[in-house]
Amino acid sequence: MGSAARSAAAELVATFGLVVATVGSIVVAGPSGAGLLGVALASGFALATLVSFAAPVSGGHANPAVTAAAWVVGRISGARALLHIGAQLVGATLGAALVRLAFPGPSWRAAELGAPLLAPRVGAGRAVLLEAVLTFLLAVTYLSSVGDDRTPSPTSGLPVGLALAVGVLVGGPLTGASLNPARAFGPELVAGVWAHWWVYWAGPLAGGALAAAAHWFLFLRRGEPSLP
């Protein structure tokens, strides 16, 4: 298997696992009483583990917004970025399909299979802003830890997982805190829930672009050699 295929496979598996953990925790949150904190912990721990697993192979993005940020700062080529995003969307869809098969219909339907939805009185513009800000924090954390190939660490995914957990705690009650177009796309496709779907692309991608700009101007020195 070539490097591109291995990289795509790692992104598919990482995103699959993230969606299973996140969507599964949302489906059981009500019946088990775990609630928002349970979803935040499950999402954050899953991302920390999966990013650390996939980072040596693919960079461990598991998120099109993070892939876009990595591309902007030169961590990945355009062709490889598109390959990663495709793999992430497939992984997210498979993860959502597994949750749908694993849980009784009334359970996953009551939670809309974890598809992110706007809370009442939260308009699309405000939702895009919130998703952008929280994804910015997630992506800039990634670029400063996992994304820095000069300082690899088995626990480098931990800060990224914590950033996601914080994002879920802050934004979950308002937008569902997707912070990840693939994580939104999988449940939306499998459950057929497309309300404000574009919010969960526009917000995270804008946040990823802002994170790349901030990382570039604050941390990358002029004349510094590009990373592979």
Image (cartoon, rainbow, N blue to C red):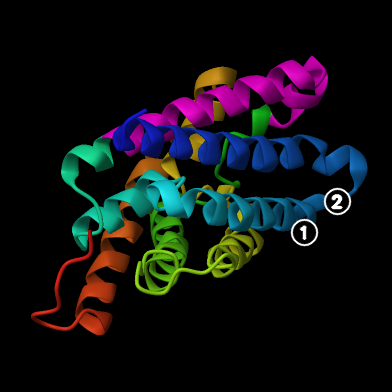
- One can see residue 126 in this view: yes
Classify 10 Å Cα crowding around label 1: few (below 14), some (14-19), many (20 and above).
some
Gap between marks 2 and 1 measured at Cα: 7 Å
Residue beneath label 2, please? 34
| Residue type marked 1 | Leu
> Are dots 2 and 1 in contact, CB under 8 Å?
yes
Q: Where is residue 110 drawn, in percent x and y?
A: 76, 27
Residue at image position (25%, 40%) is 80
User: 113 left or right of 66?
Assistant: right
Classify 10 Å Cα crowding around label 2: few (below 14), some (14-19), many (20 and above).
some
Q: Where is residue 148 drawn, in percent x and y?
A: 36, 69
Instruction: Report the front residue among 96 and 70.
Output: 70
Residue at image position (50%, 37%) is 184
Farthest left residue in view: 223
Farthest front residue in view: 1
Locate the C terminus and report the quarter of the image it occupies. bottom left
Start and end of the magenta stretch?
83-111
Residue at image position (40%, 31%) is 87
Q: Where is residue 122 drawn, in percent x and y?
A: 52, 51
Residue beneath label 1, please? 37
- One can see residue 173 in this view: no
Q: Where is residue 199 drawn, in percent x and y?
A: 40, 43
Q: Specify the principal SS of the magenta part.
A: helix
| Residue type marked 2 | Ala
In the image, residue 119 sits, relative to residue 145, either above or below, namely above
